[in-house]
């Protein structure tokens, strides 16, 4: 496994914002079934998705549509019941628990709605943590962490605890943490869900810059069309199936579907 | 690899420091356990050494011949008029047994003693002029008992330090008079301090008078029930014992099938007994203390279990950003190990201090062995690790998604 993980480093510094040819994420006939048995819940029903290197994709859908399940699988936190998920040519169903942990560590950057920082560790320690698990030396960790914190403009808070800074600042720290191991894919789960409009805008701006300047592949889950509008491509899920997969509407283009109208009416 | 362990150790230390109070409370179990082990073992070993030292000081070449009532099989005879031993036996032992250097009858009776100002209950030892030599006991003031004192039943006595303080306070008792019953006794000499004997009896709380005074004037009997002897040297004790036995059997006219009507005991035997008893005590204390260590270990397990539940989300976050099962395992194990070794180390310090304090209070020198310190600390670390394992496994087995959702 480690061989594949290390030999696919072909990201070229392209100034072209065009999506690359290389497929970063490949889902084939992906199913996820919970509680196999009489009360089985079919959360994902045969998804086929390709996400190319450098692509910025939003996944939308009402609650219960399967988008959280999909994000868990994309984040290598969960495994599909059937079908395949390839991340940077690595077939994840082959991997053991610890290999999945290594995959998350080196290939995936997570940004969560509730930031998920370690409350009793300082900002700097939080950002260093992924590198601790990657086995990076202490000196190198400090340098990389400070560089990442500078990138999101929060370096002056490095010795604060998460509780001592605002929500927007915490999310910046979380972004810095997601970047320190140079991930192939950034997964953002409702990254602005706990933030006010102004702060949300700042966070989305950072993500857009990461996409435009660093050509990071970003997959973002949201139910907010305003947030989805920052992406290049929108996938809409309903009942575990893709009901729309289209370029994000720009000014004058077709409107982003209103997911509330798509949700299953409650009984 | 090694760096990762160091990193985990740092994280563990930070985590424990952030929960100072809780960590400390957890450690108390270990602290108690380790210090109790060290205190118990050191003090008991110290007591043992002091016992043996006392016995050696008393003279390992000392032997007691005690009259035993064979007919009624009632054990040693103490105040009986019909003692199987006699002063003639004592003289014969001294003259005929070449492994014996000195022998003399002894009779002890605890009596009410009064001086001109005080009164006290003091063991009064009736003995011969050889008593102080056999016991290797010096006179610091005045004179020793002399042969004529014994033969003439002169009303004189020697006084130990404790008895002196009880009866005369700070005054010099030499040439003063004490009263025992109807008798007046003149104090002729002061014994040097001897301290406590192996049985914890204050040897200085004593008045020594000529043997016939206790026998005839106090008890109204003729012969002593105990003969105190000393062997020529420590090595000759066994030979002396057999010579004494043979001589007394012959003198008492015992046939080959008769049991001894006396018993010979030696301090060498007592030393062995003291050693055995102390070692058993040490072992007992050690196991009791180990139990407290185990209890401390359960405390650690409890806290670690709480920590795992409390920190489920933290574990989820760590797993999400790439912590392997091994890394989570390592983290919790190290925390458990840090708690228990830190507790163990504090326990060592407290144990050494406590042992010194307690030993000082009971008047012995604590015997600290590095082995016991090492055993106690490594045992505490082991217990910590052992009891850290279950919570650790639980933490590492968590599903990252569930752990992340945990509040």
Image: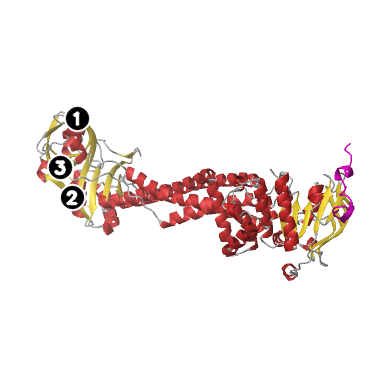
Q: Are marks 3 and 2 on the same chain?
A: yes
Q: Spatial distance from mark 2 to mark 1, Cα to Cα?
A: 29 Å
- Residue B318 lies, in percent from the top left, at 66, 54
**Which residues, given as a range, are shown in magenta?**
A243-267
Secondary structure beneath label 2 = helix
Chain of the residue displaying label 2: B
Label 2 sits on residue: B133
Disc 3 crowd rating (10 Å Cα; few below 14, some 14-19, many 20+) is many
Can you tell which of label 2 and label 1 is closer to the viewer? 1
Secondary structure of the residue carrying numbered label 1: strand
Q: CA distance from mark 3 to mark 2?
A: 14 Å
Q: Position of residue B402 (x, y in %)?
A: 73, 48
Q: Alpha carbon of mark 3 to alpha carbon of mark 1: how far?
A: 18 Å
Which comes before the other along the chain, label 3 or label 1? 1
Magenta: main secondary structure equals: loop
Q: Quadrant of residue B150?
A: top left
Mark 2 or 1 closer to N-term?
1
Residue reaching furthest to the front: A252
Residue A82 is inside the magenta segment:
no
Mark 3–mark 2 CB contact (< 8 Å)? no
The coloring applied to the image is secondary structure
Q: Could you tell me which chain the residue with mark 1 belongs to?
A: B
Image coordinates of residue A134 in percent, x first then y, are 65, 62
The residue carrying mark 1 is: B119
From the image, tell me which residue sits under label 3: B190
Q: Residue at x 42, y 48 (%)?
A: B350
Label 3–label 1 contact, CB within 8 A = no
Q: Nearer the viewer, residue B9 or B95?
A: B9
The answer to whether residue A96 of the structure is visible from this angle is no
């Amino acid at each position: 496994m480690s061989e594949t993980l290390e030999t696919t480093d072909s990201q070229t510094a392209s100034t072209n914002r065009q999506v690359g040819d290389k497929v970063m994420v490949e889902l084939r006939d992906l199913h996820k079934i919970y509680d196999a048995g009489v009360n089985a819940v079919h959360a994902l029903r045969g998804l086929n998705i390709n996400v190319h290197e450098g692509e910025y994709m939003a996944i939308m859908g009402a609650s219960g549509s399967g988008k959280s399940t999909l994000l868990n699988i994309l984040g290598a936190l969960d495994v599909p019941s059937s079908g395949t998920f390839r991340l940077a040519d690595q077939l994840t169903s082959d991997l053991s628990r610890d290999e999945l942990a290594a995959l998350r560590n080196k290939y995936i950057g997570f940004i969560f709605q509730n930031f998920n920082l370690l409350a009793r560790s300082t900002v700097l320690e939080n950002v260093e943590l992924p590198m601790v698990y990657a086995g990076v030396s202490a000196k190198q960790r400090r340098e990389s962490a400070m560089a990442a914190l500078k990138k999101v403009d929060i370096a002056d808070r490095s010795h604060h605890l998460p509780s001592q800074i605002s929500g927007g600042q915490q999310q910046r720290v979380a972004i810095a943490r997601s970047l320190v191991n140079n991930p192939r894919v950034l997964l953002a789960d409702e990254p602005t869900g706990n933030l006010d409009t102004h702060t949300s805008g700042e966070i989305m701006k950072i993500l857009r810059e990461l996409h435009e300047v660093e050509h990071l592949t970003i997959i973002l889950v949201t139910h907010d069309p305003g947030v989805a509008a920052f992406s290049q491509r929108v996938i809409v899920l309903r009942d575990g199936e893709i009901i729309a997969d289209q370029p994000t509407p720009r000014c004058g283009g077709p409107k982003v579907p209103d997911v509330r109208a798509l949700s299953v009416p409650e009984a | 690899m090694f760096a990762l362990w160091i990193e985990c150790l740092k994280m563990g230390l930070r985590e424990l420091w952030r929960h100072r109070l809780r960590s400390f409370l957890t450690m108390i179990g270990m602290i108690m356990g380790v210090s109790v082990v060290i205190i118990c073992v050191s003090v008991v070993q110290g007591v043992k050494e002091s016992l043996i030292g006392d016995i050696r000081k008393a003279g390992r070449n000392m032997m007691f011949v005690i009259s035993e009532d064979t007919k009624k099989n009632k054990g040693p005879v103490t105040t009986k008029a019909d003692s199987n031993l006699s002063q003639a036996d004592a003289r014969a032992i001294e003259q005929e047994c070449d492994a014996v250097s000195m022998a003399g009858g002894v009779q002890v009776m605890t009596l009410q003693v009064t001086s001109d100002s005080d009164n006290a209950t003091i063991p009064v030892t009736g003995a011969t002029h050889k008593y102080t030599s056999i016991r290797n006991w010096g006179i610091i003031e005045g004179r020793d008992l002399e042969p004529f004192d014994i033969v003439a039943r002169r009303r004189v006595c020697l006084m130990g330090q404790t008895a002196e303080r009880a009866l005369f306070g700070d005054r010099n008792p030499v040439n003063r008079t004490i009263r025992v019953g109807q008798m007046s006794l003149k104090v002729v000499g002061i014994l040097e301090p001897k301290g406590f004997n192996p049985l914890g009896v204050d040897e200085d709380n004593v008045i020594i008078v000529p043997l016939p005074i206790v026998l005839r004037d106090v008890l109204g009997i003729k012969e002593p029930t105990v003969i105190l002897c000393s062997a020529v040297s420590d090595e000759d004790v066994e030979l002396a014992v057999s010579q004494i036995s043979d001589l007394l059997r012959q003198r008492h006219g015992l046939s080959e099938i008769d049991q001894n009507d006396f018993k010979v005991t030696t301090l060498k035997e007592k030393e062995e007994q003291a050693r055995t008893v102390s070692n058993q005590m040490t072992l007992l204390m050690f196991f009791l203390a180990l139990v407290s260590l185990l209890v401390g270990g359960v405390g650690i397990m409890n806290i670690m279990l709480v920590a795992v539940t409390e920190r489920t989300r933290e574990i989820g976050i760590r797993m999400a950003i790439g912590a392997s099962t091994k890394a989570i395992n390592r983290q919790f194990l190290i925390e458990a190990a840090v708690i228990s070794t830190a507790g163990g180390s504090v326990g060592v310090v407290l144990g050494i201090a406590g042992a010194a304090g307690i030993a000082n209070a009971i008047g012995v020198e604590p015997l600290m062995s590095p082995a016991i310190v090492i055993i106690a600390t490594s045992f505490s670390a082991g217990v910590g690790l052992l009891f850290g394992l279950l919570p650790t496994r639980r933490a590492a087995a968590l599903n990252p998604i569930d752990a992340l959702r945990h509040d």
